[in-house]
Amino acid sequence: MTQPEKSVAIINASAPLSKANAKDALDIALIFGSYEQAVSLYFLGEGVYQLVAGQQPEKVEQKDFLKTFAALEFYDIENIYVCHHSMIERGLTNHFSIENVQVLNRDDFSTSLHQHQTILRF
Amino acid sequence: MKSIAFVITTPPNSNLTATAINMVTAALKSGIEVVGVFFYQDGVLNGSLHLALPNDEYQAHQQWQQLHNDHNLALHLCATAADKRGLIDDISDNQATHIHQAFTLSGLGELVELNVNADRLIQL
Amino acid sequence: MSMLHLVRTSAFQANDFQQCLNVIQTSDTLVLLDDGCYNISHDLWQKALNKVTLSALYIVEAHAQARAIAIDKNIINTLSLEALMTLICETEKSVTWQ
């Protein structure tokens, strides 16, 4: 039985360094991308710290997996959304480590997330 | 009736895992097809052969094994997550495996398959 | 495009429930389970009641009973895990806040 293609949303809700969630979520995103599945990334709450430019993970013995965000377009992952409210809460500006990030207000973020059939959160 | 696949991220000593097991069991009881279970992050610890929980405590790993035996439920351990946690499966040496036979080591591609084949993918 | 929200942590401990409420829409369904059951005592529960109709707010009965949480039927409905699995199938998609 052929099923209509499901699109996947991955909510990144953890800061990048202390926990492995960011890396584990990124691995899943890349796999879905390489299998040509539609996948979109959402950054919410602490997750918005993942996209902050100028981080130096090697200072705390982390491999710089954040660089991989720049390669997302090669996996056809082009829908990257950030919660504006989460950024304001943390005093962050639109200075991201990658381009083509879409900053959405709360309502638009929710509406966009509701478009997907599968939602994972890390 | 719809079909469901599960992603499990919690270890066997967490009560959240007991909830997950009860949800899988409830799905099967309700006649819902469970396409498979994918263990990710600390969830892979459920597949360890060497778990020794006190006899009077909940045996999450045995519950998974029972579900596998009774319902032929596919239990996939993420191979990378298992490696990171010392769960090695040396097929050339039966003595060297750390993984219970009810579980299968799989790549993340298996998660993609489960998502395609199930109507719902539930993360627990 | 209704979404089922599974809330598994207490808002006294983590901000998962707060995030859920920021994303939830009027036509969605909300289920409290595990330590998420404690959220009916949190100030945020009023926000849940304001955003979602009472008929779409649930708590897993056994999980509430296990925690000695009294259930007020005026602010939440109970369900079994079997009913939850049916609800998951009936709702187009689910997200877990844990």
Image (cartoon, coloured by chain):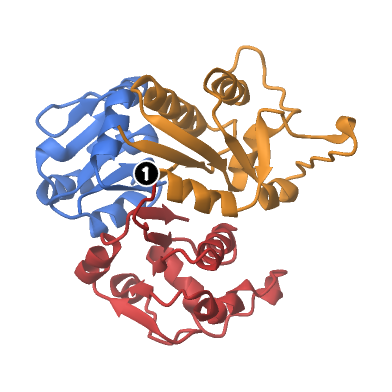
Chain colours: A red, B orange, C blue
Front position in the image: B47 or B115: B115
Q: Seen in the image, is C77 located left or right of residue B74?
A: left
Quadrant of image for the N terminus of chain B: top left
Taking the spot 16% from the left edge, 33% from the top edge, the residue there is: C76
Q: Position of residue C78 (x, y in %)?
A: 21, 26
Taking the spot 44% from the left edge, 32% from the top edge, the residue there is: B34
Q: Position of residue B90 (x, y in %)?
A: 84, 40
Marked residue chain, label 1: B
Front position in the image: A93 or A81: A81
Tell me the SS state at disc 1: strand
- Residue that numbered label 1 is attached to: B120
Taking the spot 57% from the left edge, 26% from the top edge, the residue there is: B64
Q: Seen in the image, is C98 located left or right of residue C45?
A: right
Quadrant of image for the C terminus of chain B: top left
Q: Position of residue A37 (x, y in %)?
A: 45, 63
Q: Amino acid at mark 1?
A: Arg
Picture quadrant of residue B68:
top right
Compared with B46, A109 (above or below) is below
